Amino acid sequence: MNRKIKALIVDDEPLAQRVIEKYAQDVPSLEIVAKCANAIEAQEAINNHDIDLMFLDINMPKMTGISFLKILKDPPMVIITTAYSEYALEGFELDVIDYLKKPFPFERFFKAIQKVQEKLILNDPKANAELNAIAIQKSRGVDYERFIFIKSDKKNYKVNFSDICFIEALGDYIKVHTVDKTLVTYLSMKKMEALLPVEAFVRIHKSFIVNIHRIKTIEGNMVEVKNERITIGNNYKKQFQDLIDTYSAK
């Protein structure tokens, strides 16, 4: 699926609208086509635009987001954005894609967009055929690994996630250390962390993210990866230890 996701923001708080707009600017596949302060404006926007996705607040004047969603005959995909968690169950019963509790960080926002992309792909006959072809190839023993393209030195390098050993912060840049090379690219650690598979990568320091499958040894507050010894930051010790405990022999 190459086209952009056309999105609508429905929220009566200008600050909340700006947060979503700012996050959307960092997601190339997402385009905000309209902003509304209430359900009446939202209905008009849906009538006048081809909307794929709606960011929907719950507590709004005239009509709540939940009430509005219930009366829509053919609603777009919905991500609920609210300061209240008590509506989560009702939201998911209405088949929303995700439920973001304010204030939410960019990483959580990006994961919600990934769910939207996955659903759009599954609903795309051409993409579905491609996925089926990959599934057939897998059954024949061909390993299709997940990967990312990283721009470095005016080239785009295809890098399998499994080949990444660790990522290091370098000012406004990051260094991606793989099994056979190191790539320097203009990207923040925060954005890179959001792109990585959560089951394989963990942040152990404000300046380091490691692939747990590439860790050689752990000694005290030091982790050895690709012959480098990296300090585990105090703010990341518990999260890291909890993860390691799930892999430890008891």
Image (tube, rainbow, N blue to C red):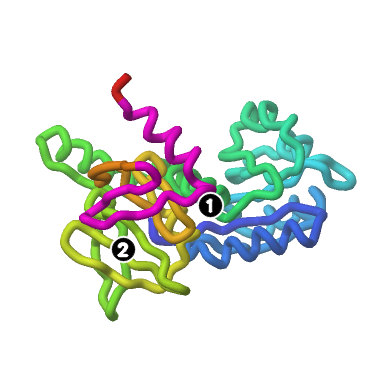
Q: Quadrant of residue 199?
A: top left
Q: Are marks 1 and 2 in contact (CB under 8 Å)?
A: no
**What is the crowding at mark 2: few (fewer than 14 residues within 10 Å), some, or many (at least 20)?**
many
Q: Position of residue 171 (x, y in %)?
A: 46, 73
Of residue 92 and residue 70, the one placed in the foreground of this image is 92
Relative to 42, residue 72 above or below: above
- In the picture, measured across the screen, residue 2 lies left or right of residue 18, that is left
The residue lying at 58 percent from left, 40 percent from top is: 98
In the image, residue 180 lies in the stretch drawn in magenta? no
Residue occupied by mark 1: 107
**N-terminal-most mark, 1 or 2:** 1
Q: Position of residue 244 (x, y in %)?
A: 37, 34
- Find the magenta span and give its range: 220-248
**What is the crowding at mark 1: few (fewer than 14 residues within 10 Å), some, or many (at least 20)?**
some
The residue lying at 44 percent from left, 61 percent from top is: 207
The residue lying at 59 percent from left, 32 percent from top is: 95
Residue occupied by mark 2: 176
Residue 169, numbered circle: none
Quadrant of the image containing the C terminus: top left
Q: Position of residue 24 (x, y in %)?
A: 58, 62
User: Total number of numbered labels?
Assistant: 2
* Secondary structure under the numbered disc 2 in the rendered image: strand
* Secondary structure under the numbered disc 1 in the rendered image: helix
In the image, residue 221 lies in the stretch drawn in magenta? yes
Amino acid type indicated by mark 2: Val
Tell which tag, 1 or 2, sits nearer the viewer. Answer: 2
- In the picture, measured across the screen, residue 213 lies left or right of residue 30, that is left
Of residue 71 and residue 96, the one placed in the foreground of this image is 96
Of residue 131 and residue 172, the one placed in the foreground of this image is 172
The answer for how far apart the CA atoms under marks 1 and 2 are is: 19 Å
